[in-house]
Image (cartoon, grey):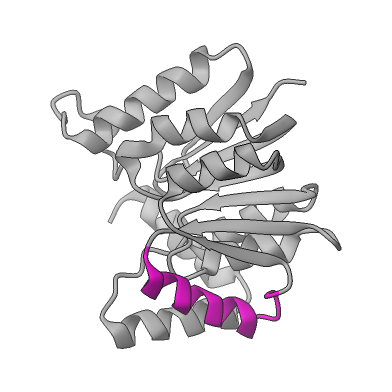
Amino acid sequence: MSEARYREQYIETILPPDPARDAIRRALLQRGWPDMCVSQALGRFLTQLAMSAGAALEIGTYAGYSAICIARGLRPGARLITLESRPEHADLARHHIEAAGLGDRVEIALGNAAETLARLRAEGQRFDLAFVDADKPSYPRYLDLVLDLLYPGGLIVFDNAFGRDRVFDPSAQSPTPVALRELHRRLFEDPRLVSTLLPMFDGVAIARVLL
């Protein structure tokens, strides 16, 4: 087992139980779906980031756990719009978000993410925080689309930024590591952003839009 995995397991053992996470795990197991939700530790990190947000955006709802974590941190009156392309995922997420008592803070937008982001832009919607945990080859495109929706000072967070460590292997030239390397390059070269890569879990990329 890797040193990083030992650290993750230790953190998980000292965190208090999260009934929402446990319920989602059971639901995924019953359906035979993979557990692709963020860890409880990363979920708490998202809760912290959301505490200063008046409006939040998520690309990739899946079973709803990261949406729950973001919504927990939102101040009164703030809302999260979370984007999901698959109806069965949206239905499961909606059930668990409502069970967590957060249905009034979360809107699930069903459909193609790029099309939904274009609609939000046309509506003039803006956000303080965006969390991206969706199809990795599309991360560079999501960066372009989301930057147009963030307020100055806003944060954009990308999960799985290391692509299961494939970005570190120069011979790995499949769409995911290639796209992630492109994302990293653009995050650090874009003069509008202050960015960093955190060696948490499978890598977390964070960028703040300059004022």
Q: Is residue 118 found left or right of 72 in the rendered image?
A: left
Judge by depth and name the residue closer to the eye, 157 or 113: 113
On whether residue 89 falls in the magenta region, the answer is yes
Q: Position of residue 137 (x, y in %)?
A: 30, 38
Q: Would you say residue 162 is visible in this rendering?
A: no
Q: Quadrant of the C terminus?
A: top right
Magenta segment: 86-103
Determine if residue 92 is in view. Answer: yes
Query: Is residue 169 toward the left or the right of residue 78 in the image?
Result: left
Residue 192 location, x and y as percent? Answer: 63, 16
Q: Main secondary structure of the magenta part?
A: helix
Quadrant of the frame with the N terminus: bottom left
Name, please, the residue furthest toward the right: 76
Q: Relative to 98, is 1 above or below?
A: above
Residue 79 position by quadrant: bottom right
- Which residue is pictured at 56% across the width and 47% down the height? 131
The image shows residue 25, relative to residue 62, as above or below, that is: below
Give the x, y percent position of residue 43. 58, 60
